[in-house]
Image (spheres, helix red, strand yellow):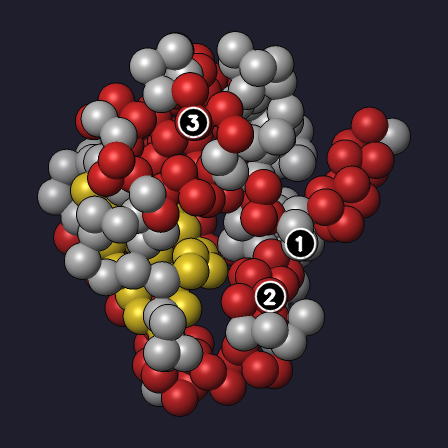
Amino acid sequence: MRRIALTSLFATTLLLTANLASANGSKNAPFSLPELPYANNALEPAIDARTMDIHHNGHHRAYVNNLNAKVKDYPALATTSLEDIQASVSRYGAAVRNNAGGHYNHSLFWTLMAPVGRGGSPSPVLQAKLVQTFGSQEAFQTKFAEAATRVFGSGWAWLILKPDGSLAITTTPNQDNPLMDVVTERGTPLLALDVWEHAYYLHYQNKRADYIEAWWPVVSWNQVNARYDAATGKR
Ligand code: MN3
């Protein structure tokens, strides 16, 4: 029952990703770890339960705690949305860039996945845009996987909607993301993939390409569709 309740809460509230997890918590610790919208083992076999637990409860929690620890240096963090922090991240030091990025990226990443068979497929409008941009959905996935595989060291792969209305595949190092005012190719994230080793090493070791291939069946296209509709004003 708990999972059903969470899933339905997720469906209705995650469309409003504008304030993703930033409004919770106290004044001194305004950022809090969002619950996963599924059980730790819900994405198996693509992502095993232990990796999910360490990733969410360990890594993501550390970004949240480290970001809260910077509020004393930057009081404005407590009253700025997580998205707006990304967009003005150049005003802050490296610790905010890394940890606000980490908090935003992971909060988003969890929502972009669903158990196998529950993620839906690209909507007709997104499908048409993928075909127009990349030739086909398959060609998009191949290109996205290639970009994700090529990230040197730790980072992320993204599908973004650019300000001119076009789609693009980009990558960022570390915990940078396409909302940040310090990255070269900016846009609204529609899909994100964490390719840090902590995201896959327990199960896949050095075989990042295998992790990426296994990940596609747990992509929540329903969420990608919702983000595309919201970003294009068609919601
Ligand atoms: Mn990660």
- From the image, tell me which residue sits under label 2: 230
Circle 3: element type:
helix
Name the residue carrying label 3: 76
Q: CA distance from mark 2 to mark 3?
A: 27 Å
The answer to which image quadrant residue 207 occupies is top left
Helix, strand or loop for disc 1: loop
Quadrant containing the C terminus in the rendered view? bottom right
> Which residue is tagged 1?
15
Q: Position of residue 16 (x, y in %)?
A: 65, 50
Q: Residue at x 36, y 62 (%)?
A: 187
**Mark 1 Cβ and ligand 1 under 8 Å apart:** no
Q: Residues within 10 Å of mark 3 (few under 14, many from 20)?
A: few
Q: Earlier in the sequence, mark 2 or mark 3?
A: 3
The amino acid marked with disc number 1 is Leu
Residue type at mark 2? Ala
- Residue 232 x/y as whole percent: 54, 74
Mark 2 in CB contact with mark 1 (< 8 angstroms): yes
